[in-house]
Image (cartoon, rainbow, N blue to C red):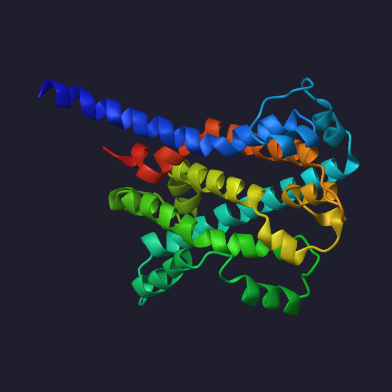
Amino acid sequence: MLERKYLLPSLRYIVLVAVSLFMAGPILTAFLGSIRTTGEFLAQPFGLPVSGIHWENYTTILQSPTFWRALGNSAYITIATTLLVVTLASMLALVFARIRFTGRSFLFNILTLGLLFPLVVAILPVFIQIRQFGLLDNVWGVILPLTTFGMPGAVVILRGFFRAIPNELEDAAYIDGCSTFSFFLYILLPLARPAIAAVATLQVIYSWNEFLLPLIVLNDPNRWPLPLGMMQFQGQFSTDWALIMAYVMILIVPAIVFYLFTERFIVTGLTGGELKG
């Protein structure tokens, strides 16, 4: 019995460490490739630097105007998408959580079907619609579909928080003269800060790393976000893998740092921790 008591936790930790190392493998490979030459990387992808650490791979990218232009494009797409998702999803969640009308459950179920169809599955009809609206080669042709496909999950998270707020609080607000919008703005949103932070965090990471949609929509390299910027290091006959690995590290480090600082908001937002009790 005593052996089982200590064996199960030890086995659990071993599995977690193994999974963590497996998931960190691509990041470690990218980092090792970013501080070596392309020849060293091709000869031994998982090896250590032979001729010293080549930090010039990073300085070459950071000194490129193309990189900073792509950074601005990524920031614009990410901020605009996140603001739209948080604003629209919070208002839609209010309707599904606090306002009763015929067909509410049916419409909410239709909305949640969006969780079953990721953007990559619907890329062809999305492209046709973007072309019909004249948004090809326009960053809003990226922002609007990202907002649309981010809405179902955001509404589901926020609706759960809004429904957990006691009805007595809403009745008291109405007695004090609050309108529905005032109750939403001054009571619901402050109480739902963990859920809003979780929605915003997930949307930032999703929008920052999106590759396929900008690739399909944006033809002008001046409008490319960071995930597409690495293609500038790929020529017709050769590819500078060292610079690409450095570019990948610069791309993923902000997302990792942002996630580490906001992880607690995601956990709290998805579990409804601050509304319990």
Q: Is residue 253 left or right of residue 215?
A: left
Tell me if I can see residue 175 in this picture: no
Q: Where does residue 162 sit, x and y in percent of width and height?
A: 38, 52
In the picture, the quarter occupied by the N terminus is top left
Is 265 located above or below residue 142 in the figure?
above
The answer to which of 247 and 187 lies nearer the viewer is 247
Q: Is residue 91 left or right of residue 45?
A: left
Residue at 22%, 26% in the rendered image: 7
Tell me if I can see residue 248 in this picture: yes
Residue at 69%, 73% in the rendered image: 127
- Residue at the extreme left of the image, as rendered: 1
Residue at 71%, 34% in the rendered image: 33
- Residue at the extreme front of the image, as rendered: 43
Q: Where does residue 176 sit, x and y in percent of width and height?
A: 39, 49
Q: Quadrant of residue 85?
A: bottom right
Q: Quadrant of residue 43?
A: top right
The answer to which of 258 and 211 lies nearer the viewer is 211
Q: Where does residue 251 sit, x and y in percent of width and height?
A: 70, 40
Is 134 located above or below residue 253 in the figure?
below
Is 122 located above or below residue 220 in the figure?
below
Number of numbered discs visible in the structure rendering: 0
Residue at 78%, 47% in the rendered image: 230
Q: Is residue 166 left or right of residue 246?
A: left
In the picture, the quarter occupied by the C terminus is top left
Q: Where does residue 214 sit, x and y in percent of width and height?
A: 72, 60
